Image: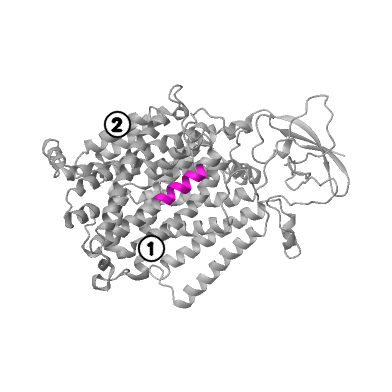
Amino acid sequence: MARWLPRSTDLTRFCQKLNRVKTLEDDMMETSFNRCLSTIDLTLLGIGGMVGSGLYVLTGTVAKEIAGPAVIVSFIIAGFASLLAALCYAEFGARVPKTGSAYMFTYVSVGEIWAFLIGWNVLLEYMIGGAAVARAWSGYLDSIFNHKIKNFTETHVGAWQVPFLARYPDFLAAAILLVATAFISFGAKVSSWLNHVFSAISMGVILFILIMGFVLAQPKNWSTQEGGFAPYGLSGIMAGTATCFYAFVGFDVIAASSEEARNPQRAVPRAIAFSLGLATGAYILVSVVLTLMVPWHSLDPDSALADAFYRRGYAWAGFLVAAGSICAMNTVLLSNLFSLPRIVYAMAEDGLFFQIFSRVHPRTQVPVVGIVVFGLLMALLALIFDLEALVQFLSIGTLLAYTFVAASIIVLRFQQQKVDVPALAAGDRPNPEPHEGPSSGELKEYESFSDKLQLVDRDKTKQQREPGQLKAAFEPYLEFLSDFYPGEVVTVAVVTLMVSAICLCSILVFGNTHLHLPTWSYSLLLVLFSLGFLLSLLLIWAHEQQHSTQTFQIPLVPLSPALSIVLNIYLMLKLSYMTWLRFAVWLLLGLLVYFGYGIWHSKENLRELQPQRLSARYVVFPSGSLEERVQAVQPSSQPTAGLPDTDTDDCKR
């Protein structure tokens, strides 16, 4: 019976396949897309993705039902929390200027299967998000005409009473998605121009709201007679923060567009910072004027801004607010339809998704097949499905992507940069001199038949340690960690950190409610998991990391990404169990696609199957002995992916 069990070597190779990382091209600026987007274009795309209907609906809902006027504080905290995730996206977008956003960032640092699952979840997130916004757009326009469109449809088409289906088919929502799909298909420049128009109108309306709002402001609406500034206390502020956090989802459209940016190393970080700053400012200022115009407890959650102007005697302003709301929802639609096909394109280009979606139109230079197919699917969702039950699914996909991007930042920052070893032609004499780095006289470490082999400096001294190695100050205390390959300890510490964060957040969320833990065990578990989290953080910090002055880098690594990981996990655990159940079903479908298609058609898999050439090189050991290594390497045009195959290595004295 033992012969039917898989061998340990087979399991090891299978795990290596699942966790292989993407090999990036030498020239990452080379692309089949049109690099035509400037910093302003990317900034407006980001603002369009964040400042949508939430500005007109969410502010009033949170102010009345959750936080009161302290919704301002909720938006400040939520903006800071979003900044942690946004900075991670900014570093990756500048460092890896390729389309794919969180999928691409996970693929180049963590592994293939994790990248596929992130892309798979983001795919559904964008589809449901775009369809939900289209239905909100339709409903808002319908309310302006006293629900005549809805009544006409129910009268002439009929109403349904079927689970998971909408009460009536929303032809208007499907139509606006089809029109938006047509515009997106014309190219990035047309999409950007259209986004400029709607964003300009939306920002003009926001400016009008702020000016008129401060003119009509009444400070007494924050007085104790009206309930005070924070009527729901600190718990209300934090609950409002969790809700307001999702208002800032949308800046990842900038990272998804980095392959179409003219100068992504500079434009992507700046655009993310500018758009997030402007969006946060807009949410805070609109919350200020809204709660100062009328008492917070009298707000209409469905149309707070329009109702506030109406009650102050400016009914005509309601039409401007409605126009601004519709334009804002248009920018969110464009953002979803712009990002989704590009993420699908990145997955298809890597071979993990069906190859037809990697086709780029030669004239418009956009993935037109993906745009049309997923535009139609989005329109179908908006036409017949009840999306209210699925809207929470948007949150879990986004938070999971944020978590993996933050973890990827830590892993990549403490990894050594891979250096290709060129193959030697027949008859060439191998150079016994070690290869030196471009900017220093130090040796780079090369992967050989043993993962532990290192080249030693010519003078047997190292002026500067490589990324992933233990800092010199900690060697006397953590000497046993010096034997590990650079980056190995950090990778294990990141996994431990995430497990500790999950356990810590689980105790915080479920300890008193679902688990009913006694006080002593609740406190003990909090202390233990907090210590595990902090020790993992300190262990990561004790290693050297990459320092680059060429592209943007997030400050305070690993602290900033670690805080983002904790926050994202905490918010994920606050979601309902039905959301997690649907998420699990969607993950299972994704695994079927990956193991049925992606793992076999992956470009990294095809690269491993290509015939290899042998290359010789000399390695100098600390003892001074010289060894010649004959190793299978990839052709020089394709960097070696993953670990070398030890079966083909040979060694001779």
Q: Position of residue 291 (x, y in %)?
A: 28, 61
Amino acid type, callout 2: Val
Identify the residue at the far front of this view: 215
Left or right of 625? Residue 371 is left
Residue at position x 57%, y 46% in the image: 552
Left or right of 372? Residue 430 is right
Residue 443, by quadrant, is top right
Report crowding for label 1: few under 14, some 14 to 19, many 20 or more residues within 10 A (C-alpha): some
Q: Is residue 60 visible?
A: no
Residue 151, by quadrant, is top left
Marks 2 and 1: in contact by CB < 8 Å? no
Establish if 552 lies above or below 77: above
Identify the residue at the far left of this view: 155
Q: Position of residue 304 (x, y in %)?
A: 24, 55
Report crowding for label 2: few under 14, some 14 to 19, many 20 or more residues within 10 A (C-alpha): few
Residue at position x 23%, y 45% in the image: 320
Front residue of 291/445: it is 291
Residue 564 inside the magenta-drawn segment: no
Q: Which residue is mark 2?
A: 179
Amino acid type, callout 1: Val
Label 1: state its secondary structure. helix
Q: CA distance from mark 1 to mark 2?
A: 39 Å
Residue 271 inside the magenta-drawn segment: yes
Q: Position of residue 287 (x, y in %)?
A: 32, 58
Q: Which residue is mark 1?
A: 73
Q: What residue range appears in magenta?
A: 268-278
What mark, if any, has residue 603 been given in the picture? none
Q: Nearer the N terminus, badge 1 or badge 2?
A: 1
Establish if 176 lies above or below 307: above
Label 2: state its secondary structure. helix
